[in-house]
Image (cartoon, rainbow, N blue to C red):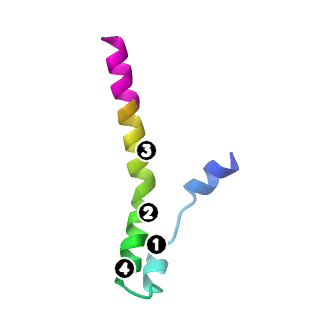
Amino acid sequence: MNLFINLLQEVNIEEKIKTAPNNAYEIGVFIGSMLPFVILVAMAYLIYYFNKKKNQ
């Protein structure tokens, strides 16, 4: 449960970008902040796909 709470903690992205050494760091922060959402969407689609295939 603690792992789940740690994953959902809000990260101050603006502060990280202000202290970024270069533009490549900003890209990494953006990808790192979007990655959990992309993974959740992919998992939801896979569950939907397999359940749809199972019902047919």
Label 3 environment density (alpha carbons within 10 Å; few <14, some 14–19, many ≥20): few
Which corner quadrant of the image does residue 53 belong to?
top left
Dot 3 or dot 4: first in sequence order is 4
Please identify, in this view, whether the residue under mark 4 or under mark 2 is nearer the observer: 4
The crowd level at tag 4 (other Cα within 10 Å; few <14, some 14-19, many 20+) is few
Amino acid at pointer 4 = Ala
* Side of 53 where 33 appears, left or right: right
User: Mark 4 = which residue?
Assistant: 24
Work out whether residue 42 or residue 17 is closer to the camera in this orientation and state it: 42
Q: In the rendered structure, are the residues bearing label 4 and label 1 in contact, judged by CB atoms less than 8 Å apart?
A: no
- Which element is circle 1 on? helix
Label of residue 13 in the image: 1
Callout 2: SS: helix
Q: Tell me which numbered mark, 4 or 2, is placed earlier along the sequence.
A: 4
Residue beneath disc 3? 40
Looking at the image, which residue is at 41% across and 78% down? 25
Image height of 37 relative to 18, above or below:
above
Could you tell me if the residues under marks 4 and 2 are in contact, i.e. CB atoms within 8 Å?
A: no
Around disc 2, counting alpha carbons within 10 Å, would you say few (fewer than 14), some (14 to 19), or many (20 or more)? few
Which residue was labeled with disc 2?
Answer: 33
Residue found at the very far right of the displayed protein: 2
- In the displayed structure, 48 sits above or below 2; it is above
Q: Quick one: label 3 or label 1, which is nearer the N terminus?
A: 1
Dividing the picture into quadrants, the one containing residue 21 is bottom left
Say whether disc 1 or disc 2 marks the residue closer to the N-terminus. Answer: 1
Figure quadrant of residue 50: top left
Label 4, label 2: how many angstroms apart (C-alpha)? Answer: 14 Å
Please identify the residue farthest to the top as the structure is shown: 56
